[in-house]
Image (cartoon, coloured by chain):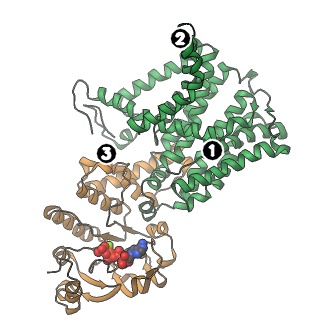
Chain colours: A orange, B green
């Protein structure tokens, strides 16, 4: 059953075509990998899903747990987040001057109540809400082994840890679907392995649907259920990892441009 | 939250308190005693300065909510203080409302005006937004001086003295208590705000607005709320000036005022409540200290003394530049360094 359906999506920036007539689906509960050479349009797909880019043509539909369909291509980012779509960024976008804890508390934003007045007065209800959601955040901290970093300012953390915090912040939202843009980029082999482990745990233990973009083909082959390959904003292949790996069009796309790490 | 050597929290509730450590409680106690004793020891000159600091603290916290915490630059501080002052005064003069009611309404009116002038922030950032708020400043200045039917134009508006249980509240001694209560209330409100949901959203918008939106923060609402919240307190500061001086003149609310307040929060510390207070105190005291230095030097070095009044603006500028160069995080950071030193004392290492 699809949780996300992208239908005939086209996105252009002036003369540059980022996506052209892209149709693909994300099935509920799967771990889908989105791969392709540099500039293929992978990040653009995530940006369209999370509402940061508006496609000129096509639709994106999200099917919620209760069966309602939501037209994501017409909603602003914060509404999409409230529907349970969480993500990380290729270039890590954290709230640098806040602590790990505060970053994760922002992950609870859509689930919490409370405006300026109730916050400033900090009376019973707001106080209880903060404590209740803090509990929730502590669970995520526990899950991602972030205890020692809890009170550290995020901007001062090592790169690999920042990636973990960004993923933890997305998890704090309790997402139905998690979009990860190159979560292992810039990591060493050991860090990559533990990140892959976390992604698998998120998927298996928490039952979250995951879409992951990555250039490390070994990681992708290890963890994904299904792979979609993009090139020049089009889908050129999709299927189980082993199958896609041997696909002539895929090899061509990567070798033809003489880059990427496809083996 | 960092802990003193040997202090551990076992419940989230205690970890989440504003002043969780014994040393912080003691400092707060000392401050409270000082604030209570001060007016009985100080003469009217120092009391007046204290009152000015209290008002400036309210205004600086208000501005810091917008600029320091939410990252939206504003050159309209003077305008928003003016809206607070004129509203508070005119509501009483024209509608006969009690001064307390007028002040409360003035805060709300300024909040509404603030969110209106904050509309450009939805499209504009940084310097462009600064120019848009400058326009707000110019419009309000023009209205103050030219909309004679309402504001009295360049003439001063004289207000009746505010009274509480028969006591005149605009004497330096009586106003001190009102001013301290307002400043403390504003500080407490802001401190609470920034440890809860909406305050975190303000800071998130400042640090990374795109990430904020995809985690579920409504940028449109949050920015307007920041303008409204900030303007509420800025309006309060304006209304306090009106009833402290019982006279409202447009000269108090010019672009100069906007810049002086920006100086306060930069010198004190952007995104810091105690920094807002430090900055308000320093910028308020600086001219007084320079003037006192001038009097002290009158006999020994009359030449220097006569030059000092002219040097005031220069000293002001130099202090700000020194802060920008040597401690961009302001007095708040310096104070933090001092505390850190004692935090781990007698050990020489620093905490994280
Ligand atoms: N905001 C933008 N403005 C202009 N062009 C853009 C923008 N975002 C993406 N593009 C263009 O769209 C195309 C697809 O970019 P996208 O970032 O989606 O690729 P990608 O597959 O994520 O690449 P990479 O592997 O390098 O991250 C590229 O040609 C890119 O230059
Ligand atoms: Mg990309």
- Do labels 2 and 3 touch, CB within 8 Å? no
The residue depicted at 42 percent of the width and 76 percent of the height is A48
- Do labels 1 and 3 touch, CB within 8 Å? no
The residue depicted at 45 percent of the width and 38 percent of the height is B269
Question: In the image shown, does B126 or A75 lie closer to the viewer?
Answer: B126
Question: In the image shown, does A248 or B293 lie closer to the viewer?
Answer: B293
Q: Which residue is mark 2?
A: B301
Image quadrant of ligand 2 equals bottom left
Residue B273: assigned label: none
State the quadrant of the C terminus of chain A: bottom left
- Judge depth for marks 2 and 3 and give the one in front: 2
Instruction: Let me know if residue A32 appears in the view.
Output: no
Q: Chain of mark 1?
A: B
Residue farthest front in this picture? B303
Q: Which residue is mark 1?
A: B232
Residue A151: assigned label: 3
Instruction: Where is residue B248? Give x, y as percent.
Output: 75, 34
Q: Are there few (<14), some (14-19), or many (20+) residues within 10 Å of tag 2?
A: few
Q: Chain of mark 3?
A: A
Instruction: Where is residue B52? Give x, y as percent.
Output: 61, 27
Instruction: Let me know if residue B5 appears in the view.
Output: yes
Q: Are there few (<14), some (14-19), or many (20+) residues within 10 Å of tag 3?
A: some
């Amino acid at each position: 059953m699809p949780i996300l359906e992208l239908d005939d999506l086209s996105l252009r920036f002036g003369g540059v075509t980022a996506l052209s007539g892209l149709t693909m689906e994300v099935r509920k509960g799967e771990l889908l990998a989105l791969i392709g050479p540099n500039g293929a349009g992978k990040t653009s797909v995530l940006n369209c899903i999370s509402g940061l880019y508006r496609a000129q043509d096509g639709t994106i539909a999200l099917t919620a747990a209760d069966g309602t369909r939501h037209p994501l291509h017409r909603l602003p980012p914060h509404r999409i987040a409230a529907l349970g779509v969480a993500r990380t960024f290729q270039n890590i976008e954290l709230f640098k001057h806040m602590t790990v804890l505060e970053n994760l508390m922002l992950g609870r934003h859509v689930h919490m109540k409370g405006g300026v007045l109730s916050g400033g007065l900090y009376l019973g209800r707001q106080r209880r809400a903060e404590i209740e959601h803090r509990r929730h955040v502590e669970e995520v901290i526990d899950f991602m082994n972030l205890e020692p970093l809890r009170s550290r300012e995020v901007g001062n953390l090592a790169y690999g840890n920042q990636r973990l915090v960004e993923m933890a912040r997305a998890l704090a939202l309790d997402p139905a679907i998690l979009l990860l843009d190159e979560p292992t980029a810039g990591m060493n082999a050991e860090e990559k392995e533990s990140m892959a482990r976390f992604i698998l745990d998120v998927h298996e233990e928490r039952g979250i649907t995951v879409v992951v973009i990555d250039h490390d083909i070994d990681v992708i082959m290890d963890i994904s259920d299904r792979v979609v390959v993009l090139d020049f904003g089009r889908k050129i292949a999709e299927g189980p990892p082993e199958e896609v790996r041997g696909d002539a069009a895929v090899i061509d796309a990567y070798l033809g441009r003489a880059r990427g790490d496809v083996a | 939250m960092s802990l003193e050597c040997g202090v551990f929290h076992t419940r989230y509730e205690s970890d989440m308190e504003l002043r969780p450590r014994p040393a912080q409680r003691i400092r707060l106690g000392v401050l409270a005693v000082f604030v209570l004793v001060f007016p009985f020891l100080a003469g009217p000159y120092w009391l007046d300065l204290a009152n000015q600091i209290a008002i400036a603290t309210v205004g600086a916290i208000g501005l810091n909510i917008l600029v320091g915490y939410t990252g939206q630059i504003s050159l309209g501080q003077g305008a928003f203080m003016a809206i607070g002052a004129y509203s508070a005064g005119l509501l009483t003069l024209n509608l006969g409302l009690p001064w307390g009611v007028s002040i409360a309404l003035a805060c709300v009116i300024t909040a509404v005006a603030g969110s209106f002038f904050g509309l450009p922030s939805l499209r504009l950032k940084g310097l462009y937004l600064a120019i848009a708020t400058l326009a707000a400043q110019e419009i309000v200045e023009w209205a103050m001086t030219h909309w004679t039917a309402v504001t009295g134009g360049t003439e001063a508006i004289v207000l009746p003295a505010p009274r509480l249980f028969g006591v005149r509240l605009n004497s330096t001694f009586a106003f001190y208590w009102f001013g301290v209560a307002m400043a403390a209330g504003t500080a407490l409100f802001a401190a609470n705000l920034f440890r809860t949901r909406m305050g975190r959203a303000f800071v998130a918008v400042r640090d990374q607005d795109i990430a904020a939106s995809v985690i579920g923060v409504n940028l449109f609402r949050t920015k307007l709320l920041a303008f409204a919240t900030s303007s509420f307190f800025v309006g309060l500061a304006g209304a306090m000036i009106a009833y402290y001086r019982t006279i409202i003149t447009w000269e108090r609310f010019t672009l100069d005022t906007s810049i002086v307040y920006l100086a306060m929060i930069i010198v004190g510390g952007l995104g810091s409540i105690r920094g807002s207070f430090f900055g308000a105190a320093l910028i308020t005291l600086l001219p007084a200290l320079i003037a006192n230095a001038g009097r002290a030097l009158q006999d020994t070095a009359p030449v220097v003394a006569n030059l000092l009044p002219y040097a005031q603006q220069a000293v002001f500028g130099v202090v700000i530049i020194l802060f920008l160069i040597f401690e961009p995080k302001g007095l708040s950071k310096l104070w933090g360094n001092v505390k850190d030193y004692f935090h781990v004392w007698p050990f020489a290492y620093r905490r994280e």
